[in-house]
Image (cartoon, grey):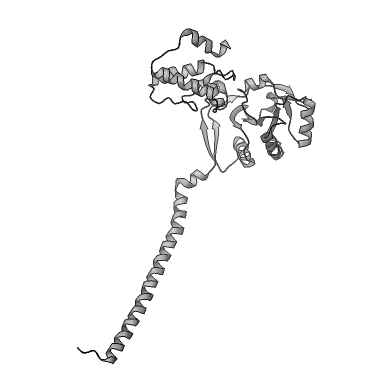
């Protein structure tokens, strides 16, 4: 059929109208699809977060000893001359805080301890055990200037020993109202953490998940003998019997770094110690090869021989 000028123009107009219509239809579909995708991208993650473990992982976790041991008793006088004893503190939550005036992190933590003592003055007792070698009078002046509203005592080698040693400052032992040590915090933590921990030990509601652990040296180093794993020591490839032998040796042999602890205790107390790490892993390799130490070397390296 011969196309006239009029037909050609009409065809062009119809094609243009069809193209415009198709554009708007496709655009509308695209907008609707994009809107649906955008809606999914906004709503689905929120719905998933509400029903996934991701949200659970955002909840703080507090860890406490499953079968806490009784706090080693002490009776001393604080820097004001008042008697401080564990027996008199039964019924209160106690934070036994080892610190020193020269310790920067300790000074950073003091305002938090002051705030906790003021906030829970009827149910909490913070006790500051000073590790200073300076005279008590000098420590007392520091405590007064800092506004420490809780008793400060001078620490001693015996007190440190009974609490398993203090490897770093600050170190805080958390003692529940029954006089049992439920946790040991090494280093500085935010006030909200301390507050949540204290509230939990007091039996008050907290927005945290509570989990328990068996003390294998995390609180009292003497319990390192209970541990089946040690920081920085690989027992891979050992049979259960060999693991038992290796752990026995690690708990019987003393570390030579000068800490006066067993190898197991040193690994828990100072995970960065290269000496205990090297000796411990060497012992594991010897056990794997079936090599046993001589009686002389075992006696020489035992903690009681130093």
Residue nearer the viewer, 113 or 70 = 113
Foreground of the two, 226 or 300: 300
Compared to residue 241, the image places residue 118 above or below, namely: below
Would residue 36 be visible to someone looking at this image? yes
- Where does the image place residue 73, in percent across and percent down from the top left? 66, 21
Query: Which of the 4 quarters of the picture holds residue 74?
Result: top right
Instruction: Point out the image quarter for the N terminus.
Output: bottom left
Residue at the image point whose x is 60% and y is 27% from the top: 181
Q: Is residue 203 above or below residue 139?
A: below
| Quarter of image, res 265 | top right
Q: Nearer the viewer, residue 80 or 171?
A: 171
Which of the 4 image quarters holds residue 128?
top right
**Residue sitting at the far top:** 296
Count of picture labels: 0
Using the rendered image of the protein, determine whether residue 80 is visible from the camera's viewpoint: no
Relative horizontal placement of residue 191, taking residue 301 as reference (left or right): right
Is residue 18 positioned above or below 207 on the image?
below
Relative depth, front residue between 23 and 208: 23
* Position of residue 12 in the picture relative to residue 166 (left or right): left
Q: State the residue at coordinates (63%, 20%).
A: 161
- Where residue 48 appears, as percent x and y from the top left, is 44, 52
Q: Could you say where residue 121 lies in the image, as x and y percent from the top left? A: 71, 36
Is 184 located above or below residue 275 in the figure?
below
Q: Where does the image place residue 182, in percent across and percent down from the top left?
A: 58, 30
- Image quadrant where one finds the C terminus: top right
User: Going 44% across and 20% down the picture, which residue do you hit?
Assistant: 284
């Amino acid at each position: 059929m011969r196309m006239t000028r009029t037909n050609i123009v009409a065809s062009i107009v119809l094609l243009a109208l069809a193209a415009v219509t198709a554009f708007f239809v496709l655009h509308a579909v695209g907008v609707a699809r994009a809107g649906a995708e955008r809606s999914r991208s906004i709503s689905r993650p929120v719905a998933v977060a509400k029903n996934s473990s991701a949200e659970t992982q955002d909840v703080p976790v507090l860890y406490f000893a499953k079968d806490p041991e009784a706090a080693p008793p002490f009776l001393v006088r604080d820097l004001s001359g008042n008697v401080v004893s564990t027996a008199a503190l039964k019924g209160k939550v106690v934070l036994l805080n080892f610190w020193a005036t020269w310790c920067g992190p300790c000074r950073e933590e003091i305002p938090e301890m002051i705030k906790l003592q003021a906030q829970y003055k009827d149910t909490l007792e913070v006790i500051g055990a000073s590790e200073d070698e300076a005279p008590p009078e000098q420590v007392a002046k520091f405590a007064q200037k800092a506004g420490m509203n809780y008793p400060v005592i001078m620490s001693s080698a015996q007190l440190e020993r009974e609490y398993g040693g203090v490897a770093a400052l600050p170190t805080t032992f958390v003692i529940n109202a029954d006089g049992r040590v439920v946790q040991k915090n090494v280093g500085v933590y935010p006030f909200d953490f301390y507050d949540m921990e204290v509230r939990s030990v007091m039996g008050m509601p907290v927005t945290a998940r509570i989990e328990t652990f068996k003390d294998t040296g995390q609180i009292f180093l003497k319990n390192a003998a209970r541990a089946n794993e040690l920081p920085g020591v690989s027992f891979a490839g050992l049979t259960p019997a060999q693991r038992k032998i290796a752990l026995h040796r690690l708990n019987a042999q003393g570390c030579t770094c000068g800490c006066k602890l067993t190898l197991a205790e040193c690994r828990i107390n100072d995970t960065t110690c290269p000496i205990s790490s090297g000796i411990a892993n060497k012992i594991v390799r010897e056990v794997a090869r079936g090599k046993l130490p001589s009686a002389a070397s075992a006696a020489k390296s035992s903690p009681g021989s130093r």
